[in-house]
Image: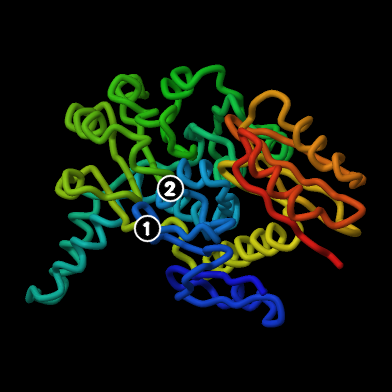
Amino acid sequence: MFRIQTINKIAAEGLNLFSRDRYEAASEFLNPDAILVRSASLHGAALSKSVLAIARAGAGVNNIPVDYCSENGIVVFNTPGANANAVKEMVLASLFLASRKIMDSAAWVKSLANEPYADGDFEKLIEKSKSLYGGPEIYGKTLGVVGLGAIGVMVANDALSLGMNVMGYDPYISVDAAWKLSRNVQKAESLEAMLDKSDYVTIHVPYSETTKSLLNYERIHEMKKGARLINFARSGLVDEDGVIHALDRGRLALYVTDFPSYKLLKHEKIICTPHLGASTPEAEINCAVMAAKQLMDFLETGVVRNSVNFPRCTLQEQKNYRLIVVNRNIPNMVGQITTAIASRGVNITDLVNHHQGNYAYNIIDAEQKLPDDVLDNLRKINGIIRVRTIDKK
């Protein structure tokens, strides 16, 4: 019986996948096998040694202590693409919000509700004042998309359908994303070249030390004069002071962000939304279902998909006994592991080993159950982080 600790409210469609004969899912467990979380921070939380995996029902994992998890052999999953359509729709809406002064004009009209008007005066005021809220069309304009992952590809393709010219920049685009990207999206040779030509720029890259302030002060001021910037990825990707300075000097026309900060709130050329990017019932369901399936695959078969700290590692369904080994990515680890197994005459029927950065992950199938002393010897090997067995019999 696997125990899943749920943190935050997880969509029932995801939780219902955990069969009651094999799983218990609850918000309170002393020693869970896995944790399913949305936005709650696990930094500083006391994670039990029993925890094998943490699944984040969402794309970002900044609420999870990934480095600590890696050091302790805890696989961290996210759900890339599960909320992509929800975020894409907000980005497309932001193109119009950034252009047509929709929010300002609606707020102004609403402010007239308590004013007395003689016959015809209200209509005259509306007609007289509408020119104050004019703005350009997006048709025929150039959209620059920074990052062509699941969301970026959808934004780029749909912007083409709206009649925009689209440029994309992503030096690390995946094969899957490349297959989905329209051939009509122009490839930018550099980020700077794209910023110089784009009337609108939207950013869709994960936050890390290498992408922190990717749109820094200098790059923001290199953007096309009068451009509009949209950020539904992460707050730390964009230099807020650089944005404000560029807005004040007319370099930028407007900034739309899903990550409000106090310094942004009072600026008339900044539209802030309260983390609405993935806030749809459909996205919450998709993320919960995807996270639950990944946990089930991992717990039952050891398969790793969409982990942020360990490599993708799959092996066809086991027939007998399966061994999972997590180790540091150092020389001769596979040799030591297989030697320890063979020392007791146990035959390995299949093996897969993949590494990512400083860590490696192994799935090993054997004809017979490994004796406890072999498992103990494996755990004593320098560089081994975690060992567990999965018995199909």
The reply, left or right, for residue 218 in relation to residue 203 is: left
Secondary structure under badge 1? loop
Q: Where is residue 313 in the image (x, y as percent from the top left)?
A: 73, 44
The reply, left or right, for residue 332 in relation to residue 393 is: left
Q: Which colour scheme is used?
A: rainbow
Residue at 21% x, 65% y: name it: 109
Q: Residue beneath label 1, please?
A: 45
Residue type of the residue flagged with mark 2: Pro
Above or below, 277 against 149 in this view is below
The image shows a total of numbered marks equal to: 2
Viewer-proximal residue, 146 or 97? Answer: 146
The reply, left or right, for residue 129 in relation to residue 323 is: left
Most distant residue in the bottom direction = 20
Q: Residue beneath label 2, please?
A: 65
Say whether disc 1 or disc 2 marks the residue closer to the N-terminus: 1
Q: Position of residue 8 (x, y in %)?
A: 43, 69
Viewer-proximal residue, 366 or 363? Answer: 366
Q: Where is residue 211 in the image (x, y as percent from the top left)?
A: 43, 30
Residue at 56% x, 28% y: name it: 170
Marker disc for residue 203 = none
Q: Distance between the residues labelled 1 and 2?
A: 9 Å
Above or below, 46 against 236 in this view is below
Q: Quadrant of the N terminus?
A: bottom right
- Is residue 160 shown to the viewer in this render? no
The reply, left or right, for residue 171 in relation to residue 333 is: left
Viewer-proximal residue, 354 or 348? Answer: 348
Residue type of the residue flagged with mark 1: Ala
Q: Where is residue 179 in the image (x, y as percent from the top left)?
A: 74, 38
Secondary structure under badge 2? loop
- Is residue 323 shown to the viewer in this render? yes
